Image (cartoon, rainbow, N blue to C red):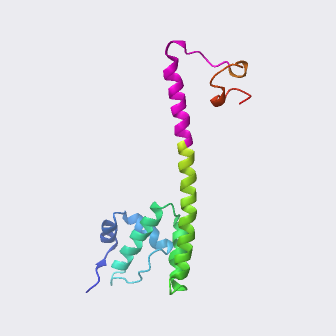
Amino acid sequence: MSENKYKIGQLAEAAGLTIRTIRYYDEMGLLKSNERTSGGQRIYSDADLVYIKRIMELKNLSFSLEEIKRIILLSDEDKSGELRREILLSSYREKLIDAEKKVKALNDHIGELKWHIKQLESAYDSFQECPGSLCTNCSFKRNCSFSSKK
């Protein structure tokens, strides 16, 4: 089975990226193609397309291009792939912990917004400005950001 060959525009189109992005990835060393046409244009392979799709996948999982580059460059010294597997596994775990923290923070924020909506909806005709720390009997003191004592 013969491998497809791509000029930069064809590769960009196949990957759904811009030519500028392909050039940037190439300059960073994320693509390994050294093949050129007689006119000096780079020729990319199916392997380059796979690398680009992997880069896009890792970027979607919050990996920086520097992190991705370190992983890709390990292929020269890590022929078995075991080191890359371990690094990816560790990185995925770190990204998961970060994502879970963000979800918790977002859920806390959502809860706070819901609480404020509920309080304002129940206030209909009796809505008044909060007197802050002067209000010792306020039923909303638990969530009040103006009160000095919570």
Give the answer, above or below, for where 98 lies relative to 48.
above
Dominant SS in magenta:
helix
The stretch of residues the image draws in magenta is: 108-131
Q: Is residue 68 magenta?
A: no
Task: Residue 111: name its quadrant.
Answer: top right
Q: Is residue 43 visible?
A: no
Residue at left 47%, top 63%?
A: 59
Q: Is residue 118 magenta?
A: yes
Q: Position of residue 23 (x, y in %)?
A: 42, 69
The quarter in which the C terminus is drawn is top right
Q: Position of residue 131 (x, y in %)?
A: 67, 18
Q: Position of residue 44 (x, y in %)?
A: 35, 78
Residue at left 34%, top 72%?
A: 8
Q: Is residue 118 visible?
A: yes
Give the answer, above or below, for where 39 lies relative to 60.
below
Q: Nearer the viewer, residue 80 or 115?
A: 115
Residue at left 52%, top 22%?
A: 120
Q: How many marks?
A: 0
Q: Nearer the viewer, residue 2 or 133?
A: 133
